[in-house]
Image (spheres, rainbow, N blue to C red):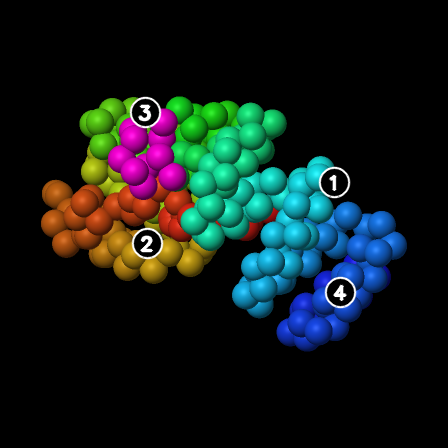
């Protein structure tokens, strides 16, 4: 039944998805509560979303605690941060990353670095990317390169772009070309532009026509990078 609900969502048939997931939940499939919470949130039914999020969290569905916390925060509910902190303390790498993002939003660099490091150590590439940004802003290019490489190796596209820009700044044109190419293949438009220009000017003294290093991607989330609140 859970799979039939998933199929309904793929067909953009929300009523079908809701029907099958509701039946799955009644049959004891806790993951259905998570699915229902997400869909009700998209549909704007916050009361039902909250109800199903709580059910999923109580059942220990992976990722549900983080998403419920971010849902509460989006609703202006102060309980959201406490929920997010509990999820992070229980080992949820995405919750750690979101705590870093929220800290960055309010300008708390200490908490930003603390939770970025925790999420990176827990395997979240966004945390490594954030540490790269912080190191670059401090002028520690060695550390920035290390963290960008870690994130880029985990397929973080903006880390690939920033690594290419950092290597270009350090006159490693072959390395820059490699990472711009990887970022371009991952869909970063600026990387494709820089890659063309880099290939045109490679071998010349200095690269004056490339985008300036200040054009480096610098959003802690996200995210893009973008801030992902519902990524599993």
| Magenta stretch, overall SS | helix
Of mark 1 and mark 4, the one earlier in the sequence is 4
Q: In the visual, does 133 lie left or right of 16?
A: left
Question: Which residue is drawn at the image coordinates 44% and 35% (left, top)?
Answer: 99
> Could you give the CA–CA distance between mark 4 and mark 3, rounded to whole angstroms?
43 Å
Q: Do the residues labelled 4 and 2 touch (CB within 8 Å)?
A: no
Of mark 2 and mark 1, the one earlier in the sequence is 1
Q: In the visual, does 85 lie left or right of 1?
A: left
Q: Mark 1 points at which residue?
A: 59
Q: Are marks 1 and 4 in contact (CB under 8 Å)?
A: no
Question: Which residue is drawn at the image coordinates 55% and 26% (left, top)?
Answer: 89
Which one is in front in this view, the residue at disc 4 or the one at disc 2?
4
Q: Name the residue under label 4.
A: 5
In the image, residue 107 lies in the stretch drawn in magenta: yes
Q: Which of 24 and 78 is in front in this view?
A: 78
Q: How crowded is mark 2: few (under 14 residues within 10 Å), some or many (20 or more)?
A: many
> Could you give the CA–CA distance between mark 3 and mark 1, rounded to whole angstroms?
33 Å
Residue 191: assigned label: 2
> Could you give the CA–CA distance between mark 2 and mark 3, rounded to whole angstroms?
31 Å
Number of numbered discs on residues: 4
Quarter of the image holding residue 169?
top left
């Amino acid at each position: 039944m859970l799979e039939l609900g998933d199929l309904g969502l793929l067909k953009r048939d929300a009523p079908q998805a809701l029907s099958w997931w509701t039946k799955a939940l009644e049959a004891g499939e806790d993951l259905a509560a998570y699915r229902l919470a997400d869909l009700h949130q998209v549909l704007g039914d916050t009361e039902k979303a909250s109800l199903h999020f709580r059910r999923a969290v109580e059942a220990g569905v992976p990722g549900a605690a983080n998403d419920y916390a971010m849902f509460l925060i989006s609703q202006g509910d102060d309980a959201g941060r406490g929920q997010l902190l509990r999820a992070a303390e229980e080992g949820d790498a995405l919750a750690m990353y979101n705590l870093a993002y929220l800290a960055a939003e309010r300008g708390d660099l200490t908490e930003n670095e603390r939770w970025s490091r925790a999420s990176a150590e827990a395997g979240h590439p966004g945390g490594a990317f954030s540490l790269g940004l912080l190191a670059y802003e401090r002028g520690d290019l060695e550390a920035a390169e290390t963290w960008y490489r870690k994130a880029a190796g985990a397929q973080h596209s903006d880390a690939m772009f920033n690594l290419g820009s950092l290597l270009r700044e350090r006159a490693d044109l072959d390395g820059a070309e490699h990472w711009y190419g990887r970022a371009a293949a991952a869909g970063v438009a600026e990387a494709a532009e820089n890659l063309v220009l880099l290939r045109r000017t490679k071998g010349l003294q200095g690269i004056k026509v490339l985008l300036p290093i200040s054009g480096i991607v610098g959003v802690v989330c996200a995210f893009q990078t973008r801030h992902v609140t519902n990524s599993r």
